[in-house]
Image (cartoon, helix red, strand yellow):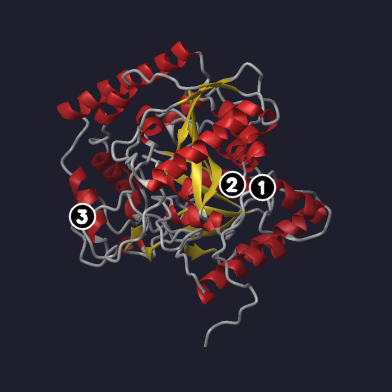
Amino acid sequence: MLDATIDSILRALRDRKITSREVVQWHMDRIAAYDRSGPCLTAVETLNPAALDEADRLDALLRRSGPAGPLHGIPTMLKDQVETADMPTTFGSALFKHYRSGRDATVVARLRAAGAIILAKNTMSEFAQPGYHGSAFGYTRNAYDTRRAPGGSSCGTGAAVGARFGVVGIGEDTGGSIRNPASHNALVGLRPTVGLVSRFGMLPGTPSRDTLGPMTRTVRDAAVLLDVIAGYDPNDSTTAYSVGRVPPSYTALLDDVPAEVRIGVVRERLSANSDPSADDYGQVRSAFDRAIGAMIEAGMKIVDPVAMGRVVELLQQASGVGESEAAVDRYLTEIPDAPVRSLREIVLAPDGLVMPSQRALLADAIGHTTNSPAYLAALVNRRELRREVLKVMADAGVDALMFPTADHFPPLVPDDILTSAESRRGRGSNNGLSSATAFPSLTVPMGLAGGIPLGLSILGRPFSEGLLLRIAHAYEGLRGPIPPPASAPDLATPARE
């Protein structure tokens, strides 16, 4: 089970070598072992109490008529930003600790229809703000180094899939919230083009940037998940952009990387707070160079370096301020029986129901609107940035751009994480380019440095997810397997008295 994939589990189920109940029970036992014997990752907000019953139903269905779909019996982790009819949706906050909307988000409905078992709702940085902590749970730990941050805001999903609490997961990404925790926990994390995957039933942050996407241990599993969740949803009008741009199967594309595909290497620093003199920066860049060398040796066409023109300058000016308050207010007034109805009410909630640092970040969004000159200037900047990225790729004759997901190791968790009003942003994240342009980007593990996972990002033109997955799949075959985290306790360890 430590190296189980969607395909390997489905084969074992079809061959009657295992049951869905046994698969679910193994993962539940692993979660319990971590929580009981340590280290407690605090990655699970709510464990699905009906998971074993659902597994029994799927086992009976398999015996009677065959699998329910491509995710039959697969234990799936879900960021608690996404509504589920049968479990609470907390958004990481004590304010919503027991809240149930009574409905499934579109993504959840599609997962269930494909046979997935939503095994757990995962912890998340409160209200999807930067960080890996919230008043509903405390803070989440990195599966590979529990002293370090797991990445946010999909922190629980990243740590849970990395620790083998589930086979695959769904995260949400506004500014790097899929790719940061995926990179930090040795996962594949795909931020799709905005409009490819429905956001209906999900708490918004910045709608022009928000997207849901897969977090998995292999590229193939990410492609299978994307096949299930991608496509038009009348409840999210942005997905109309995807019509005619979704292939019949992303999974079927994986084994065919066209010989003419050219990948550009970005050597310029995309993050304003990277430190090239730091030791971990050098280790990340060395791993990046090894990855490039492996691709070249395998015959992949690499353009190194690509001149980025004005991209870095425009990226540093990019801002998403202006959308959040109206979007959150609209969402809270539409969901049934919400404990609050506006972002302002969240900020003014009693002490203990919202963490100080997250309250401060949310307060910064109040009063900004899409009619402000600053927001209109940001729109112009983003349009110019998109055009410049496309021009850079066209001038270099490349189909995708490649760079480290983060220039530094994940930071150590500070002692005052639960009480400080200071935002907990990591340094050296290179995820802003995809977020600001709304172009797709995928992170794939480059390996471990002293036991710490490192990620390689591949960015492409809008709706080029199929190509990004094919490139990442080819690299994954060159890189070799990534070991599971050494933090795992012995499943046989008895419970503490």
User: For mark 2, what is the residue?
Assistant: 111
How many marks overall?
Answer: 3
The earlier-in-sequence mark between 1 and 2 is: 1
Residue 25, picture quadrant: bottom right
**Circles 1 and 3: CB atoms closer than 8 Å:** no
The earlier-in-sequence mark between 2 and 3 is: 2
Closer to us: 384 or 249: 384
Q: Give amino acid for label 3.
A: Val
User: For mark 3, what is the residue?
Assistant: 347
The earlier-in-sequence mark between 1 and 3 is: 1
Q: Residue furthest right?
A: 15
Where's residue 158, x and y in %? Answer: 49, 52
Identify the residue at image location x=50%, y=59%. Answer: 143
Closer to us: 385 or 428: 428
Where's residue 57, x and y in %? Answer: 70, 60
* Residue 447 to residue 85: above or below: above
Q: Quadrant of the N terminus?
A: bottom right
Where's residue 8, x and y in %? Answer: 74, 50
* Residue 446 to residue 3: above or below: above
Task: Please give the label number shown on residue 71.
Answer: 1
